[in-house]
Image (cartoon, grey):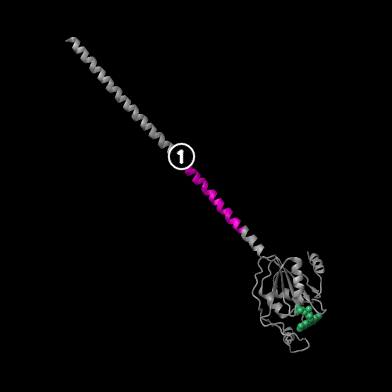
Amino acid sequence: MKRILLVFMAAFLLVSLSACGNHAQEEAKETQTAAEEQKETAESTKAAEPETVQDEMTQPETETAGEASSSETAAEQESEASAEHSDVLIAYFSATGTTKGVAEKIASVTGGDLYEILAAEPYTSDDLNYNDSSSRTTTEQNDKSVRPEIGSGDISLEGYKTVYLGFPIWWGEEPRILDIFVEKYSFEGITVIPFCTSGGSGIGHSGPNMEALAGSGTWLEGQRFGGNVSEADLQSWIEELQ
Ligand SMILES: Cc1cc2nc3c(=O)[nH]c(=O)nc-3n(C[C@H](O)[C@H](O)[C@H](O)COP(=O)(O)O)c2cc1C
């Protein structure tokens, strides 16, 4: 009987130990799973963190890129503006084509842009008759307040640093249409260089007359040319102005 009891107890102990072992295994398994889950979470958090930092770091970069692109745009605009036109303009009025020819030679020498000041009401040969004391030009030149309307489209002087201003001499000075032209525009920051053609008279007071009417710009002393002046002579004159 004692032996049976001992065998029974031994069997019970074995079963209990094996149950404990299973339980410990399960616990270890659970702990392992929890640890793995924790590791995964930690890894995923770790993986997420740099993105956030990157985002934060990317932000200023993006702003810098934005700033760069806006400054690039400004530079592009500037280069586009200068590509559009030279910083030299040759603006001229010419009733019979002589001053126009000189203006074109100055444009050829300087690479400047040409702008023709046209009268809204073109001058006819009768208008230009200086032997007629009642002709349009004689009347206009006798009255300094006359302002013949300009017929050519407006021009923006923005971007121009030098403006050559050409005209024929009428009764010793600039035609009245030049007066309205210089009054119309601001020559602020621009060097204005008057030039004229004539039958022989000099430029006279035309430059100072226009400078006073314009009220802005740096006006250089003007120069009279014959219609047949060469580009080489114009080049020398321009170089002497520098
Ligand atoms: C109304 C009028 C007045 C002129 N007065 C003078 C003058 O005082 N002195 C002079 O030398 N030439 C005078 N001229 C000649 C012009 O200045 C000259 O022919 C000029 O080169 C014409 O330039 P354009 O062809 O560009 O109009 C006059 C011409 C006209 C039509």
Q: Nearer the viewer, residue 111 or 207?
A: 111
Identify which residue is drawn at 28% across, 21% down: 18
Identify which residue is drawn at 32% across, 27% down: 27
| Left or right: where 40 falls relative to 208 | left
Residue 237 lies in quadrant: bottom right
Asked if ligand 1 lies within 8 A of label 1, the reply is: no
Q: Nearer the viewer, residue 1 or 44?
A: 1
Q: Amino acid at mark 1?
A: Ala
* Magenta-colored span: 50-74
Residue 18's place in the image compared with 124, above or below, is: above
Magenta region, main secondary structure: helix
Residue 124's place in the image compared with 186, above or below, is: below
Q: Position of residue 64 (x, y in %)?
A: 56, 51
- Are there few (<14), some (14-19), or many (20+) residues within 10 Å of tag 1? few
Q: Position of residue 100 (x, y in %)?
A: 74, 75
| Left or right: where 66 falls relative to 95 | left
Q: Secondary structure at mark 1?
A: helix
Q: Position of residue 212 (x, y in %)?
A: 72, 74
Residue 161 lies in quadrant: bottom right
Quadrant containing ligand 1: bottom right
Q: Which residue is mark 1?
A: 47
In which quadrant will I find the N terminus? top left
